[in-house]
């Protein structure tokens, strides 16, 4: 029998770049010691190999493709459905990652126990024993009569069980412990993770099964394993803790079936993860005594507004070069705002340490908080307390102009719901009709905003 030729290569575990030979530095992502030798698979002598999406189809005109919308079904959690874009899509592959103890297995166990009431579910555990999972489910008082469990780490055995049981939803916990018999590498390695994920993805696409894979994260909060893992899946979800250990934040970083900026908020209780219907209330727990440098802004997360508190502290630099530190904000954005304040606000901050924090562990990914950051810095610098009922949002431009942001009226209405009576917003976001209970001041420049406070 002819010996099958085995192909090997060198892949960066951070970015997925390939190289013909080993080297210590990845020129694609500028990382060191991340290039590993991997087995690319046996070279087929005849036939062809199916891709991640299943068997190769024939060439078809775009106009001849039938546009049938996939029927979603609920996960049993409104917050989880919101993050996914409306629920589970048959044939989709979902990767959920997070820190150890964030609650990945807990929320999936809760979801599967409720989904099993109307769907066939198979939960595959490669890390915990079935006794441990059953004990947790009983503590959470979940329905146990319909969820099918399998303790297995072999890819081939898992696929055999799935083809035999014909489930509609399959959970793999976790992909890092799965191993394929055809790959001569330890579980968790680049080649094992990639080939295992490819086999499960191909199965999901060809059978129409919803596949959910749990992934570990590295110390820099990125998913462990090759970057190709993120490219294979349809939806990538991250579950993280907040500064308050009672709450968990769920956000999508990739979603082929919905928006990627949706935020789901859960509370960790004795009965597992519970949905938080009004997340703004969590991040608005301000102290009774008002302090300088504190201000409320409105972010737009996916399809809903979210009120957050921006805090700033400005003190004289004690050690020569002043520090600029931001938690939850882009450092470069803070440096730009400080330059605009100096140029167009007439305040000299070159000899001041500036610290800015977004309360609650929220990461600001849009520019609507620029004006709130600027006014919070000025408030701390002047040691002036801003009104507790003041709401601020808007983008700051380099020439000192205040640019409008999306969904301005919806942001203002969210502020009214939480008792805010005054707002400083861009002129373009000032409502044409007065909002009951809200006095809105529209500004065109940073100088006007400073005069308004």
Image: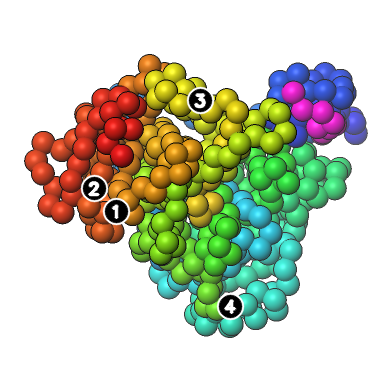
Q: Is residue 204 visible?
A: no
Query: What percent of the width, then of the height, locates residue 166?
Result: 53, 61
Q: Residues within 10 Å of mark 2 (few under 14, many from 20)?
A: many
The Cα–Cα distance between marks 2 and 1, rounded to whole angstroms, is: 6 Å
Q: Say which label, 1 or 4, has the lower sequence index.
A: 4
Near-viewer residue (445 or 55): 445
- Residue annotated with mark 4: 137
Q: Say which label, 3 or 1, has the lower sequence index.
A: 3
SS type, badge 1? loop
Residue placed at 69% from the left, 36% from the top? 318
Q: Is 254 placed left or right of 192 in the picture?
A: left
Residue placed at 40% from the left, 69% from the top? 118
Query: What percent of the width, then of the height, locates residue 66?
Result: 31, 34
The Cα–Cα distance between marks 2 and 3, rounded to whole angstroms, is: 28 Å
| 440 to 87, vertically: above or below | above
- Residue annotated with mark 1: 389
Magenta segment boundaries in residue numbering: 30-40
- Residue annotated with mark 3: 348
SS type, badge 3? loop
| 129 to 12, vertically: above or below | below
The magenta stretch spans residue 146: no
């Amino acid at each position: 029998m002819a010996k099958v030729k085995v192909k090997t290569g060198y892949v960066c575990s951070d970015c997925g770049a390939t190289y013909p030979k080993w080297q210590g530095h990845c020129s694609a992502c500028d990382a060191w010691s991340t290039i590993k030798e991997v087995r690319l698979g046996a070279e087929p002598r005849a036939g062809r190999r199916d891709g991640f999406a299943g068997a190769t189809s024939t060439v078809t005109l775009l106009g001849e493709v039938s546009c049938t919308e996939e029927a979603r079904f609920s996960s049993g959690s409104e917050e989880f459905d919101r993050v996914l874009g409306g629920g589970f899509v048959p044939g989709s592959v979902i990767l959920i990652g997070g820190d150890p103890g964030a609650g990945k297995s807990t929320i999936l166990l809760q979801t599967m126990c409720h989904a099993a009431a109307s769907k066939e579910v198979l939960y595959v555990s490669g890390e915990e024993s079935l006794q441990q999972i059953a004990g947790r489910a009983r503590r959470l008082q979940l329905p146990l009569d319909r969820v099918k469990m399998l303790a297995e780490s072999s890819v081939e055995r898992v696929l055999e069980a799935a083809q035999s049981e014909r489930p509609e939803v399959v959970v793999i916990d976790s992909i890092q412990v799965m191993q394929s018999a055809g790959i001569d590498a330890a579980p968790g390695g680049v080649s094992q993770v990639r080939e295992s994920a490819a086999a499960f993805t191909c199965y999901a696409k060809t059978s129409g099964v919803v596949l959910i894979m749990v992934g570990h994260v590295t110390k820099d909060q990125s998913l462990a394993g090759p970057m190709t893992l993120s490219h294979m899946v349809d939806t990538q979800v991250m579950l993280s803790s907040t500064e308050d250990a009672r709450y968990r934040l769920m956000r999508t970083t990739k979603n082929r079936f919905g928006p990627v900026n949706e935020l789901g908020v859960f509370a960790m209780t004795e009965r597992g993860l519970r949905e938080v219907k009004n997340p703004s209330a969590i991040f608005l727990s301000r102290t009774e005594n008002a302090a300088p440098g504190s201000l409320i802004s409105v972010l737009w997360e996916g399809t809903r507004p979210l009120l957050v508190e921006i805090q700033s502290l400005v003190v004289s630099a004690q050690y020569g070069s002043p520090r600029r530190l931001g938690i939850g904000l882009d450092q470069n954005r803070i440096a730009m705002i400080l330059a605009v304040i100096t140029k167009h606000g007439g305040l000299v901050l070159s000899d001041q340490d500036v610290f800015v924090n977004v309360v609650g562990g929220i990461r600001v990914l849009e520019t609507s908080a620029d004006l709130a950051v600027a006014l919070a810095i000025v408030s701390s610098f002047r040691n002036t307390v801003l009104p507790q009922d003041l709401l601020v949002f808007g983008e700051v431009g380099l020439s000192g102009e205040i640019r409008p942001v999306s969904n301005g009226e919806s942001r203002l209405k969210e502020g009214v719901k939480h008792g805010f009576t005054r707002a400083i917003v861009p002129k373009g976001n000032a409502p044409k009709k007065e909002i009951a209970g809200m006095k809105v001041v529209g500004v065109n420049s940073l100088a006007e905003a400073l005069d308004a406070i």
